[in-house]
Amino acid sequence: MSDSTTEPPIRLRPLGSTGLDVAELALGTWGLSGDGYGPVSNRDAEATVRRAVELGVTLFETSDAYGKGAAESLLGRLLETHPHTQIATRHGVDRSEKPARKRFDPAYLQGCLDRTLERLRRPAVDVYLLHNPTEETLRNGELRAWLRGLKASGKVRCWGVSAGSTEVGYAALEAEAEVIELAYNAFHASDLANLGSAIAEARVGVLARSVLAYGLLAGLWPVTKTFPEGDHRRHRWIDAEEMATRVRQLDALRTLQVGDVFSLRGAAVRFVLANHLVSAAVLGPRSVLQLEQLVREAGKGPPYLDEERLAALPVKLAEMGIQGW
């Protein structure tokens, strides 16, 4: 493990108009929970969280559904002595039954929140997110009333929505969400682009997830890449021809590999950070090594990428058949 002084400091950004400042690199815990990509040892998970604190990460993103609460418990135990850190958690997935189902009724969510606070060992959640609701859900008057009362209860500092589409994002803004979490990366930029003006006008904080497109944008896969059981990507990308096409499309990103941008992984992270609407890029490393690589390759600050090459990227992506713009 390298000494923390060898890594560039992680810069702070405002989380919209919430009054919170967050490090521009956040640590997501889905991968660390073992749910998304297969088992991770407790030792590796703990070491990654501890190293993130050392490197200056302030925001940790989780869910009560990750490991059926185990990810929240991990953060609660390891961050209890670091009161400057912040936790964003997502609720609305009920895994008590199989298959799991979405639940956003206030009584259920209130129970989840109370149990989350116990696991986190904190009096309040810094960022409370609904976990991929529908537009119809966000227009429910009873839910909206409950959300409005969250801050008054003292158990939540701000609330928002982890949105799966532009339409849900607009519904979140209509409901006066203070934070929106969106999938945002070089291959999928359309949701944030569509919502950008409304987000800026409302001064809403943005958490960018899927920064590396589940690992694709790291540029380390062969065209014959496959995934083991227990890895969600095994079922997400089951077509060998599609996988080969996606790997070849990475050539569009290689135009950003100039100067101090040494890897596609670094280019992908910097692409996200180059958008001024983004408050934090939520990264999902599963080891200390991966975390240190990502922090180091995020660079020393703006300009994150060559501006001319960044401006030309949409054309390059279109030429390679990327439709996420």
Image (cartoon, rainbow, N blue to C red):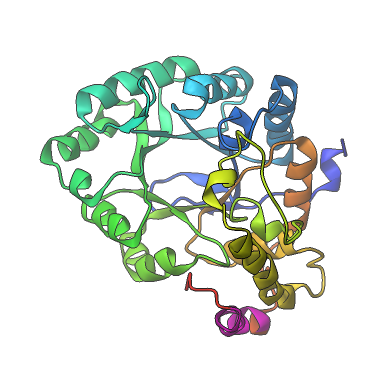
**Residue 219 in sight in this render:** yes
Quarter of the picture containing the N terminus is: top right
167 left or right, relative to 76: left
Residue nearer the viewer, 196 or 219: 219
Q: Is residue 56 placed above or below 46 in the rendered structure?
A: below
- Can you give x and y, in whole percent of width and height, for residue 275 in the image? 54, 67
Task: Identify the image quadrant of residue 49.
Answer: top right
Q: Is residue 249 placed above or below 146 in the rendered structure?
A: below
Q: Is residue 95 placed above or below 301 in the rendered structure?
A: above
Residue nearer the viewer, 82 or 188: 188
- Can you give x and y, in whole percent of width and height, for residue 138 in the image? 22, 46
At x 67%, y 76%, the residue is 252
- Can you give x and y, in whole percent of width and height, for residue 306 in the image? 70, 78
Q: Is residue 317 placed above or below 150 in the rendered structure?
A: below
Residue range of the region highlighted in magenta in the rendering: 309-320
Task: Identify the image quadrant of residue 315.
Answer: bottom right
Task: Identify the image quadrant of residue 307.
Answer: bottom right
Q: How many marks?
A: 0
At x 51%, y 46%, the residue is 21
75 left or right, relative to 98: right
At x 51%, y 65%, the residue is 188
Q: Is residue 163 magenta?
A: no
- Can you give x and y, in whole percent of width and height, for residue 51 in the image? 74, 33
Residue nearer the viewer, 2 or 5: 2
**Residue 121 in sight in this render:** no
At x 35%, y 70%, the residue is 197
Q: Which secondary structure class fits the magenta region best?
A: helix
